[in-house]
Amino acid sequence: MSEPARFLTAISQALSTMSLYGDEHPATARSRETALERLSELQSSNPQVQFTFLAGEVLFGNETVHSLENWEWSSRLMKAGIERIEFLEPVDQDHFARFLAQLAVRLGIRPGDTTDIWQMGSSPVRFGLVTLAGNKSAEPEAALPVASLTYTLREERDTIDWMHRQIQGGGKLPIVEADAVVRSLSIAMHAEQAMMLPLLQLKEFDQYTTTHSMNVSVLAMALGEFLELGGPAVRAIGVAGLLHDLGKVCIPKDVLTKPGQLTPAERKLIQEHPVVGARMLLQNPDPMQIAAVVAYEHHVMLDGGGYPTLGNARGAQYASRLVHVCDVYDALRTNRPYRLAWESERALAYIESRAGIEFDPAIARSFIAMMRQWEGQVARVPA
Ligand SMILES: [Fe+2]
Ligand SMILES: [Fe+2]
């Protein structure tokens, strides 16, 4: 069993023991000590530890704890309003005992006042709901007072930057990390009862490929959910959205951020990014089929325009058409070296006007309906 699994199992054993015995009972003290020892082991390599609890899954940082799939405590914690537990630094016995006592109350194992907000000020332990930074409605409900955790998307952004640097250096695409970023974005989207669309706001032009990739991933997953495509398909489209412009990471920054007209050679370089990206994705030992297709086809228009020329009658695949709309929307909503960002309504009107020519009309209609319906749930997160 991995160290994170050993620690969480020790926590669940301590909580079970607490439900049988009093705080002062030797069995309680012993199980608490064991759990704290497991935590110290876990923190010995990295003092900052973070767990996220989903319905059938536990994440340690961004990685699934496989031995705890369908672990019943994960659902119990989640239902009790504990979606995340973080240890920011090594924890002493006193703080750990208080943390366990709070968990026991929250889980209904111990009687206690759940409206009594734990003074988290100096505590190295935080737990509660996963919430978005800057979102006013992120305040926990009165009945579930929790330390609200901020969600900045910084880790995800840094991971994508790192992924791009790996590829620029001739390395292989880190598939596990790409998948972890998508999963993490999906968690951010479902942090609230209503669907949230956390979209990064570009500050530096040369950050465009990173912020744009994340935004297209979020928009594509949102559209996939809006169209009720089902979990695995939505996740695959999220990965495809994240990697659609992978072919751009090797294009020099000054070409990508050039404010004026491109020379024919520069235009050729840019127009090659779908082919370059698809090739990179297909070279992987575990080829990412949908992502490669989407990378190849995301600039193909419904009428056959755009690039590259497909040379088939069926046109671009469904996933590519879906990402194409999200791609154009995010590009229009962003400040570019050659024009300012458009307002959402203007970008949607453009998509509407190009439905049936550039965009699949049914997908364009759904995207517009989704953005209008979820407009209030867009969280603009500083990059
Ligand atoms: Fe592109
Ligand atoms: Fe793009």
Image (cartoon, helix red, strand yellow):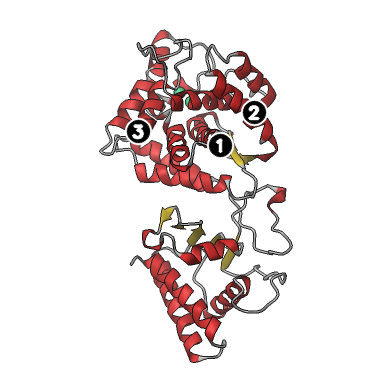
Residue at (58, 25) in percent of width and height:
329
Q: Is residue 216 above or below residue 76?
A: above
Residue 8 vs 260, above or below: the answer is below
Q: Secondary structure at mark 3?
A: helix
Relative to 193, is 178 on the left or the right? left
Q: Which mark is residue 100?
A: none
- Where in the figure is residue 151, as x and y percent of width and height? 58, 50
Q: Mark 3 = which residue?
A: 168
Nearer the N terminus, badge 1 or badge 3?
3
- Mark 1–mark 3 Cα distance, whole angstroms, equals 29 Å
Q: Is residue 332 visible?
A: no
The kind of residue tagged 1 is Ala
- Which is nearer the N-term, disc 1 or disc 2? 1
* Residue 51 x/y as whole percent: 49, 60
> Is the residue indicated by label 2 positioned so its CB lies within 8 Å of ligand 2?
no
Q: Which image quarter is the C terminus in? A: top right
Q: Is residue 275 left or right of residue 335?
A: left
Q: Residues within 10 Å of mark 1 (few under 14, many from 20)?
A: many
Distance between mark 2 and mark 3 Cα atoms: 38 Å
Split into quadrants, the picture shows ligand 1 in the one at top left
Q: CA distance from mark 1 to mark 2?
A: 12 Å
Sequence-earlier tag: 2 or 3: 3
Residue on which the image places disc 1: 222
